[in-house]
Image: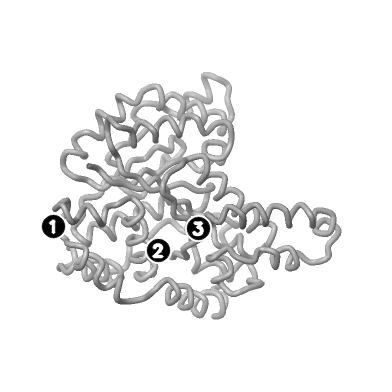
Amino acid sequence: MPFGQVVIGPPGSGKTTYCRAMQQFMQATGRKVAIVNLDPANDMLPYEAAVDIADVVCLEEVMAELQLGPNGGLLYCMEYLAKNLDWLHEKLSPLKKEDHYFLFDFPGQVELFAGSGCGSVRAVLDELTGSRHHYRLVAVQLVDAHLCTDPSKYISALLLSLNTMLNLELPHVNVLSKMDLVRQYGKLDFNLDFYTQVQDLGFLVHAMGGKPFSQKFRKLSQGLCDVVEEYGLVSFMPLTVQDKNSMRQLMVATDKANGYCFATLRGHTPYPPEMLYGNAGAGMSDRDIWLGMQEKFVDGEVVEATGLPPGVSEPPAPLPAPLLAAAAETAGREPLP
């Protein structure tokens, strides 16, 4: 029974960097991890993709032949994939037999997950999780943490997360990514736990201030916050891929969501739960994680910007040795060379 993560989120939220970091972190615990690139626009991969959608459909050729823009081209590519799932199963089958853990790197266009264009993505996921193949998947949605510095943008992120959760109907973990960069974009109006727990959202409306635009749409903003609170589904985990504790905590959360940790009881992996999760379970709690990030990345000094435009980050660097060592320690084995 294969397990994996469906990594989604808006463009620039750090999906590809997350896939690479999580692959290295899990490999250090002894897992065999395969990354499946399903983003035809992602032509500069920092990892070695076990399966690449570019082998079956090319976004640039689609745009040129059909006279489509980037978004229209991506919608066509995902529809093409949904009609050629035999190719995907043929590529995944050898990896499935070798008990690989899958990281599916999806495109970031919102139309694929929260709009009328989500049908093709649902078709792919329904086929994988259906009775024929039995993939146990969890959706990991990354949202750039800098959106927390603007109440209106944060409300938009909440609506996007809720919409995606309802459309995909998968176990779901929402993540505030790039927490180490949040101070570069401004000061948070509340403590970090306010943004991770997603409660008492009425305070967001007051934080929007008395600007004419905010006043005009005050009732609308309050109504949207009420919708999110009434569903009670959305919460976030803070993450920076260079922080060993947040990576470990997120790995545990996703493994519980897709059932991987319970599969260890049947010998799916040589690591029993008490070994694989011993340090994480007895170590830092979720509260410890956000308190540490609050102190280090929110209340601390602002890190000097790199001079790159907003939304553009440095090329991902290899994970530091302490992070890989921490992952190996979690699994109770020596770090990989």
What separation in Å lies between label 1 and label 3 (alpha carbons)? 37 Å
Identify the residue position indicated by label 3 in the image: 313
Identify the residue position indicated by label 2 in the image: 241
* Residue 293 coordinates in the image, percent (x, y): 48, 74
Query: Element type at marker 2?
Result: loop
Q: Amino acid at mark 1?
A: Pro
Identify the residue position indicated by label 1 in the image: 270
- Point 58% across, 48% down: residue: 160
Q: Which is closer to the viewer, label 1 or label 3?
A: 1
| Quarter of the C terminus within the rendering | bottom left
Quick check: 51 left or right of 125?
Answer: left
Q: Residues within 10 Å of mark 1 (few under 14, many from 20)?
A: some
Q: Amino acid at mark 3?
A: Ser
Q: How is colour applied across the structure in the image?
A: one colour
Q: Residue furthest top?
A: 65
Q: Amino acid at mark 2?
A: Val
What separation in Å lies between label 3 and label 2 (alpha carbons)? 13 Å
- Point 55% across, 31% down: residue: 117
Q: Quadrant of residue 210?
A: bottom right
Q: Residues within 10 Å of mark 2 (few under 14, many from 20)?
A: many
